[in-house]
Image: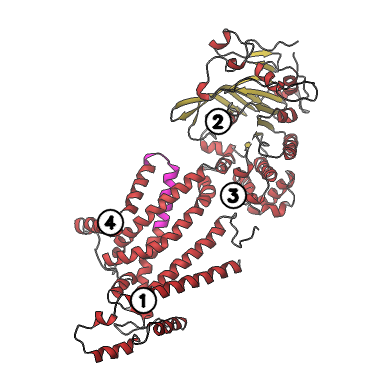
C-alpha cells in the first residue's frame, strides 16, 4: 500500500508536499453552563492547492467546528485551546481579528449549509456579492456590479442582470447556494471551505452544485475542503478524505483507497452501510449503537464501545496514528487487515 | 401601491370620523359649558343669548351635523372663551409642543437604538445589565413622578435648570429628559431583543466569513434587520408621546398645546378640545400609515402592494 493510487487532478505530485492549509493538533472547547466540553480533540488536516479534501463524519463529530475554528468564526462560547492553523506560512490562530477580516472572503472563503438562512434577507443578492469585491478589491459600484453579474453567470444563475437586484426570498434553494458560492469565489480565494453545501438541496441540484464546485476548483486552482456526512458526496467530489469520529480524525486516505480498503473499523462500518453498485450484498449492515455526545468523550478510543475488534488495550489511551505508506494513516490499534 | 394607500387613507378617514363623533357626544354628555363660565344666578335670558351665540341651543343632532359640515369647510369652531377661532388658538400653541415632542422623539430614538444595540452587542456583560436596568427603571416610573424627582434634584438641589416656563433652551431640558427617558427606555429594550435575535442568524456569520469588519457587520447587516420590529414599536410610541406630553407640559408649565388642552377640558371649551383630539388622532393615524409604508421599504419580503411580487 504505497504511492498515490489516485490521479492528482492534473496537478504535479509536488503540490501535495507544500500544503496550502495545515491544521495541526487543533483542539476546541465549548463553555457550556454545565461546564467545559471538548468538541474537537487534536485534529490535524492538510489540503493543497487544486485538491479537494472531503471531511466526513456524523453530525456532532466536529467537522464544522474544526473549520469554523480555523477561520476564527466560532460562536462566542467556543474557544481554541491548542493547535496551529498554518495557511500560506502564517498561523491563523495568532493573527488579530482585523487581519483575519482581510483574509476572510479574500484568500479563504466559506459556503454554509443552509443557503436560505445564510443570505441576508434585506439585502439584494447583487449587493451581497458585490460587498466582497468592495471589501477586498475596492471596486467601484459599477465595476463591482459588472463583475458580480459575471460571477452570477459563472455559477450558472440565469437572467443574471435581473437576478442581481433580487432578494434572497425570490431565490430557490439551489439558486441561493449558487449565489453563496458566487459570493465565496468573488475574490478568487486560495481556499474554499464548503460546509455541507448540498445537504439542504434536492438530489438533482446536489449533483449540479458539486459539479460546479469541482469546475471552479479546477478553474481557480483552489484548495477545497468539503464537509459532509454523505459518503456519496465524498465519492463524487473528493480527492482525499479525512474521517472524523467523536471529535477526532480516525482515518485519512486518498478517496479511492479509502473506499477500496478502509482501515478503521468505523470507516469500514460506514461503507458497509452504503448500497454499492460494485458489490452485491443481501442486506446492508448498520453500526450498532450511536456516536457519543461530547460530554461523554473518553480519553481512549472513542469507537471502542461500538467496535467488534477491540480489546483491553483500546480503552486506556488515545490510539496514535499509524502511517500506511505515504498517503494514508489510521488511528486504530487493530486496523482492518488488508487481504 | 396607489390602491393600497388609497384603502389605507379611506380607513383612516373612517377612524377619524369615529373619533370625532365619539368626542363630540362625550363632551356634550359631560355637562353644560355655560355652567363653567357663568356663576350661579346669572339670568336665564343672558344664558339664552350665549346659547344662541355658541350654537348650543339647537338639538344635539343639528349641532353634530353643523360641526361635521364645518370641519369639511375647514372651520373648527370658535372658542367659548376668547371668541377666537379654535384653529388659531391651537396653532399658536403648537410650535412649542412640536419643539418639545420633536426634540424628545429624535433624541430618544437615537439614544434608545444606540443603547439597545450596545446592550445586545455586550450581551450578558455589565454594560448590558446596566443599560437594561436603567431602561426598565425609566419606563416603569410614571412620568409625572420622574418629573418631580428631576425637578427636586436638578432645580431645587443643584439649581442648574429652571422648573417651569419655556423662554430659554434650558427650559427645554427637564421636560424633554422626563419624556425622553421613558421613550428611550422602551425603545432600547425593543432594539436589544431585536438585535439579539438578528445576531444569532446565520447570515451574520456569512457577513463575518466574507471579511466584513465588526462595525460593518453591525451597521450594514444587523441593524437593517433589527430595524423592522423596532420601527413598529417606535411608531406606536408616537401616540404615547403625545399623551405623555399633555401631562409633562402641565407639570413643567410648558406653554404648549397639551397644557391648552387640559385647560380647555376643564372649562368645557368644546371647539378647542375637539380640534386638539382631532389633531392627535390624525397624528397617530399618519404615524401608523408611515410605519406601514416604512415596513415595506425595510423588509423586501413584505410586499406593500399585497400581491406576491
- Toward which corner of the image does residue B151 lie, by quadrant? bottom left
Kindly identify which residue carries mark 4: B146
Label 4 vs label 1: CA separation? 27 Å
Kindly identify which residue carries mark 3: A121
Q: SS for tag 4? A: helix
Residue A239 position in % (x across, y down): 73, 26
> Are dots 3 and 1 on a single chain?
no
> Are dots 2 and 1 on a single chain?
no
State if disc 4 and disc 3 touch (CB < 8 Å): no
**What residue is drawn where x is 37% and y is 73%?**
B94
Is residue B290 toward the left or the right of residue B51 in the image? right
State if disc 1 and disc 3 touch (CB < 8 Å): no
Q: Chain of mark 2?
A: A
> Are dots 4 and 1 on a single chain?
yes
**Rendered image coloring scheme:** secondary structure
Residue B90 tag number: 1
Residue A137 position in % (x across, y down): 63, 44
Label 2 vs label 3: CA separation? 26 Å
Q: Chain of mark 4?
A: B
Amino acid at each position: 500500500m504505497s504511492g498515490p493510487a489516485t490521479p492528482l487532478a492534473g496537478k504535479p505530485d509536488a503540490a501535495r508536499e507544500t500544503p496550502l492549509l495545515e491544521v495541526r493538533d487543533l483542539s476546541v472547547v465549548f463553555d457550556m453552563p454545565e461546564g467545559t466540553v471538548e468538541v474537537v480533540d487534536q485534529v490535524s488536516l492538510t489540503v493543497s492547492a487544486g485538491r479537494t479534501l472531503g471531511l466526513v463524519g456524523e453530525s456532532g463529530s466536529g467537522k464544522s467546528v474544526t473549520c469554523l475554528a480555523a477561520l476564527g468564526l466560532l460562536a462566542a462560547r467556543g474557544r481554541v485551546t491548542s493547535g496551529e492553523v498554518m495557511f500560506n506560512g502564517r498561523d491563523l490562530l495568532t493573527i488579530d481579528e482585523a487581519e483575519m477580516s482581510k483574509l476572510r472572503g479574500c484568500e479563504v472563503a466559506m459556503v454554509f449549509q443552509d443557503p436560505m438562512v445564510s443570505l441576508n434577507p434585506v439585502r439584494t443578492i447583487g449587493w451581497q456579492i458585490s460587498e466582497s469585491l468592495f471589501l477586498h478589491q475596492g471596486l467601484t459600484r459599477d465595476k463591482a456590479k459588472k463583475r458580480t453579474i459575471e460571477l452570477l453567470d459563472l455559477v450558472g444563475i440565469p437572467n443574471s442582470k435581473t437576478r442581481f437586484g433580487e432578494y434572497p426570498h425570490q431565490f430557490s434553494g439551489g439558486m441561493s447556494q449558487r449565489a453563496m458560492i458566487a459570493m465565496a469565489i468573488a475574490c478568487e480565494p486560495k481556499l474554499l471551505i464548503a460546509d455541507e453545501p448540498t445537504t439542504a438541496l434536492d438530489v438533482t441540484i446536489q449533483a449540479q452544485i458539486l459539479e460546479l464546485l469541482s469546475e471552479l476548483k479546477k478553474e481557480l486552482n483552489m484548495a477545497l475542503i468539503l464537509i459532509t456526512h454523505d459518503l456519496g458526496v465524498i465519492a463524487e467530489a473528493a480527492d482525499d478524505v479525512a474521517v472524523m469520529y467523536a471529535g477526532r480524525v480516525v482515518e485519512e486516505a486518498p478517496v479511492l483507497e479509502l473506499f477500496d480498503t478502509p482501515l478503521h473499523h468505523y470507516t469500514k462500518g460506514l461503507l458497509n452501510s452504503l448500497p454499492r453498485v460494485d458489490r452485491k450484498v443481501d442486506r446492508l449492515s448498520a453500526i450498532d449503537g450511536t456516536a457519543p455526545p461530547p460530554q461523554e468523550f473518553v480519553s481512549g478510543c472513542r469507537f471502542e464501545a461500538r467496535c467488534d475488534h477491540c480489546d483491553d488495550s483500546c480503552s486506556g489511551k488515545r490510539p496514535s496514528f499509524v502511517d500506511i505508506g505515504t498517503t494514508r494513516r489510521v488511528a486504530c490499534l487493530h486496523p482492518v487487515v488488508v487481504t | 401601491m396607489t390602491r393600497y394607500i388609497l384603502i389605507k387613507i379611506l380607513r383612516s378617514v373612517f377612524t377619524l370620523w369615529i373619533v370625532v363623533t365619539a368626542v363630540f357626544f362625550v363632551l356634550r354628555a359631560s355637562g353644560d359649558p355655560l355652567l363653567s363660565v357663568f356663576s350661579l344666578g346669572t339670568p336665564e335670558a343672558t344664558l339664552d343669548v350665549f346659547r344662541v351665540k355658541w350654537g348650543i341651543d339647537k338639538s344635539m343632532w343639528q349641532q353634530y351635523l353643523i360641526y361635521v359640515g364645518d370641519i369639511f369647510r375647514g372651520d373648527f369652531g370658535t372658542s367659548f372663551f376668547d371668541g377666537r377661532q379654535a384653529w388659531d388658538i391651537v396653532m399658536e400653541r403648537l410650535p412649542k409642543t412640536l419643539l418639545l415632542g420633536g426634540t424628545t422623539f429624535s433624541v430618544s430614538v437615537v439614544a434608545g437604538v444606540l443603547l439597545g444595540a450596545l446592550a445586545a452587542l455586550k450581551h450578558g456583560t455589565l454594560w448590558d445589565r446596566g443599560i437594561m436596568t436603567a431602561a426598565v427603571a425609566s419606563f416603569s416610573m410614571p412620568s409625572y413622578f420622574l418629573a418631580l424627582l428631576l425637578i427636586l434634584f436638578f432645580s431645587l438641589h443643584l439649581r442648574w435648570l429652571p422648573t417651569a416656563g419655556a423662554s430659554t433652551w434650558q427650559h427645554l431640558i427637564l421636560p424633554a429628559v422626563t419624556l425622553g427617558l421613558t421613550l428611550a427606555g422602551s425603545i432600547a429594550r425593543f432594539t436589544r431583543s431585536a438585535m439579539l435575535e438578528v445576531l444569532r442568524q446565520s447570515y451574520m456569520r456569512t457577513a463575518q466569513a466574507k471579511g466584513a469588519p465588526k462595525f460593518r457587520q453591525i451597521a450594514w447587516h444587523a441593524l437593517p434587520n433589527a430595524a423592522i420590529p423596532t420601527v413598529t414599536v417606535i411608531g406606536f410610541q408616537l401616540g404615547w408621546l403625545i399623551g405623555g406630553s399633555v401631562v409633562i407640559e402641565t407639570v413643567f408649565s410648558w406653554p404648549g398645546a397639551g397644557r391648552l388642552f387640559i385647560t380647555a377640558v376643564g372649562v368645557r371649551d368644546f371647539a378647542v378640545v375637539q380640534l386638539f383630539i382631532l389633531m392627535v388622532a390624525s397624528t397617530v393615524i399618519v404615524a401608523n400609515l408611515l410605519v406601514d409604508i416604512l415596513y415595506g421599504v425595510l423588509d423586501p419580503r413584505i410586499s406593500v402592494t399585497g400581491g406576491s411580487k
